[in-house]
Amino acid sequence: MNAPLPAAGAPLPHTFRDEPFDPYSVEKMSEAQERAYLASQWTLMWWKFRRHRLAVISAVLLILLYIIVAFAEFFAPYNYQSRHTAFIRSPPQAIHIFHEGSLRAPFVYGESFKLNIDTLRREYTNDTSSIQTIRWFCHGDSYSFWGLFDGSLHLMCPAEGGSLYIAGTDRLGRDILSRMIYGARVSLTIGLIGVSISFLLGIIIGGLAGYYGGTFDLLVQRAIEIVQSLPQIPLWLALSAILPATWSPLLVYFGITIILGLLDWTGLARAVRSKLLSLREEDYVLAAQLAGARPARIIALHLIPGFISHLIASATVTIPRMILGETALSFLGLGLRPPVTSWGVMLNEAQNINVVALYPWLLWPVVPVIIVILAFNFMGDGMRDAADPYH
Amino acid sequence: MIPTLFVTSVLVFSIVVLPPGDYFDTLVSESLASGEKADLTRIEFLRKEYGFDKSPVERYVLWVSNLLRGDLGYSFEYQLPVNDLVGDRMVLTIIVSGFTILFTWIIAFPIGIYSATHQYSWGDYGLTFLGLLGLAIPHFLLALVIVYFANVWFGVSIGGLMDDRFLNQPMSWSKFWSIMQHLWIPVIVIGTGGTGKMIRAVRANLLDELQKQYYTTARAKGLPPGRALMKYPFRLSLNFFISDIGDVLPHVVSGAEITAIVLSLQTTGPLLLRALQSRDTFLASSFLMFLAFLTVVGVLISDIALSLLDPRIRLQGGQTK
C-alpha cells in the first residue's frame, strides 16, 4: 500500500506471483475448517457445550456427586443409622490444621457437654487439650455395600474413641454429613427415574400423536390439557397423601417417582408431537417415503435422531423439578418416611423455626439441594444451547 | 372447555374421595389416640347425613350439582361451610399474590429491557445470572433460610402475615398496616422465581424483535432509542406476558402452598394441604376443582386477549394441520 508511486512516465511495476496457479485454492479448507465441516452432529454439540463454562463445571460437579452417591457407604464417615447417644445435637466440629501455631494433619478438638438445667439444652464445649487426628482409608462402622457384600472401609473416620461430626448431629445423635451423603442416593436417583418414566411416556404418546395425527392426536391433546389444568403441587400432595401408610419405604419410593413421572410427561409429549409434525414435512422424509421406508423405520431412523438431543436437553431441565418435588413432599411429611433418608426427610426436622434457631446445622441439607438444582439448571441450559449446533 | 372441566372434576373427585378411608376414620383414630372414646353412633349419623353411605356415582352427582349452585360443601374439620372458610383466607391470599405479581413486574421489566438492549455486556451477564438463581432456588428453602437469618440478625420471628393480636379480627386500618409490615418477606420469597422467569422471557422476546427490519428502520429514520424501543418491539414482546395470565390466575388464588407453610401465612395453600392430609373431602375436592376451573378460565382469557391484541394469531389459527 505504502509503496512509493513510480516516477511520471516510468512503466508501472508488474505485479504477478511466481508460485504456480492453483484454481482450487479458494475451495480449499484449512484443517480446522475441515474438521468442523466433517464433524458429526454429536461432536459439534460437544464443542458447543464445552464453550459454556458454567455448564461444564456443573456437569463435572454432578458427575462427582453421582460417584459419591454410588459409593455412599465408603464416603460417609458413619453409617446413616448409627446413633451416638453421647453426642445428641452436637454442633458441627470444625476441622483444624493448626494447633497452637504449628501445622498438623487435619484434626478436630474433642467435645464435652454440660446440661444446662435452666434451658435443658446440652451445651457443647471444645476441649483444646484433646486432639483427635482424622484417620483416612480406615475401618469404622460396618455396612453392607449396596446390600451385596459387607465392609467397613471409609474414606475418613474419627480418631480411635473420638468423634467426627463435620455437620453436627441430629436429635438422635446421628451424623448429619453421613445422612446427607446417604440421603443423596435417594434424592438424586428419584429425579433420574422420574424423568425416565416421563421421557418414555412423552416419546411414545407424543410420537404416536405427532406421526399419525387424527383422532388419536385430538384425544392426546385434550388429555394433556386436562393434566396441565390440574394444579401441580396440590395434585402431588393429593396423590402422595393416598399412598397407603402400610407400604414399605421402597414401595413408597417407587410410588413417589411414578407420581412425579406421571404428571410430568405432558410437556415432553407436546415437544415431541410438534417436532414430529414439522419434521415429517421435510424433504428427507419424503425421500425416505419414496424409497419405500415404513413409518416405524422413518420415525426411528430419520425423525427421532433429528431431535433426540433436544429431548435430552429438555428432560435434563425437568430433573431438578423432580428432585425438588420429592424434597418438598418429604419436607411436608407426605413423601418418603424414615427410616429411608433423603434431603427432604432430613429437612422435615427443620420445619419448626424454634428448632432451627437452636440447632441451625439442621439446615445443612438445604445446601446440597440448592447446589444440585443450580447445577442441573446450568447444565440443562448449556445442553439446550448445544442441542442445536447449527444455530 | 366444558368437557375438559367435566373430566377434570371426575379426576379430582376420584383422587380425593375414592381412596379408602374418610374423614371420620381420621376422627376416630385421632380421638382414640388422644385417649377419648369415639362416639360411633354420632359418626354413623354424620356419615349418613353427608351421604357417605351412597355409591360413588351418586356422591359425585351430588357434589357437582352443589358446585354448580355455588355451594362448595361443608368442612368437617373446621365445622364451617367451605365458602366461609375459604372466603376469609382468600382476601389475604389475593393481597399476597397481588403484591407479588406487582413486585415481579416492577423488578423484571426494567431488568429484562436492560439485558436485551445491552446484550452480552457484563450487566447482562450478571443480571441474567441473578435471574437464573432466582428461578432455580426453591422458594420454600429460600423461605427457611431467610426465616433463620432474620431470627439470628433481627431476633424476631418474621413468620405470619400480621401481628398475632390481629388474628381473627375484622379488617381495620391498623390490621392492614400490620399486614403491610409483614408482607415484604413472602412477597420477595415468592416473587424471586417469577422474576427470574420473566426476566428471561422479556429478554428473549425483545432480542427477537430488536433484530427485525422495522426496528432498524425506526432507528434509521431518527427515532430516539427509547421511543423506538417502547413504541414497537416492547409492545410486541408483551405477547408472552398475556399468554402467561392463564398460568398466573390459579396461583393468585392458591398462593405458594409450601412457602406459605414455612412462613406460616394464613393463606389458602396451607388450608388445602391440611384438608388433603386429614381427608376433609369437600374442602379439598371443591378447592382443587376451583383451582382447575381458574386455570381453564385463565387460558381462555389469555387466548381471547391475545387474538384481540395480535391479529397474526387469529390468522394462524385456521391453518393448523
Image (cartoon, helix red, strand yellow):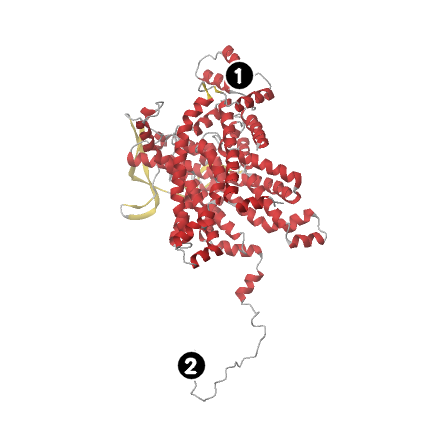
| Residue type of the residue flagged with mark 1 | Tyr
Dot 1 surroundings within 10 Å: few (below 14), some, or many (20 or more)? Answer: few
Q: Position of residue A365 (x, y in %)?
A: 41, 38
**Are the residues under badges 1 and 2 in a single subunit?**
no
Dot 2 surroundings within 10 Å: few (below 14), some, or many (20 or more)? Answer: few
Q: Residue furthest front?
A: B221
Q: Position of residue A280 (x, y in %)?
A: 64, 49
- Give the position of the N terminus of chain A as an image quadrant: bottom left
Name the chain under label 1: B
Please give the residue where the numbered disc 2 appears in the rendered image: A3
Image side of residue B110 versus residue A250, left or right = left
Q: Tell me the element at label 1.
A: loop
The Cα–Cα distance between marks 1 and 2, rounded to whole angstroms, is: 104 Å
Q: Position of residue A333 (x, y in %)?
A: 46, 29
What residue is shown at x 46% (from left), y 12% (from top)? B37
Does any portion of residue B57 appear in the rendered image? yes
Query: In the figure, B145 relative to B22: above or below?
Result: below
As rendered, which of B97 and B142 lies closer to the eye? B97
What residue is shown at x 43% (from left), y 50% (from top)? B231
Q: Tell me the element at label 2.
A: loop
Please give the residue where the numbered disc 1 appears in the rendered image: B50
Q: Residue furthest top?
A: B41
Query: In the figure, B71 relative to B308: above or below?
Result: above
Q: Position of residue A195 (x, y in %)?
A: 54, 41
| Residue type of the residue flagged with mark 2 | Ala
Name the chain under label 2: A
Residue B148 image label: none
As rendered, which of A256 and B165 lies closer to the eye? B165
Q: Residue furthest right?
A: A292
Query: In the figure, A20 relative to A267: above or below?
Result: below
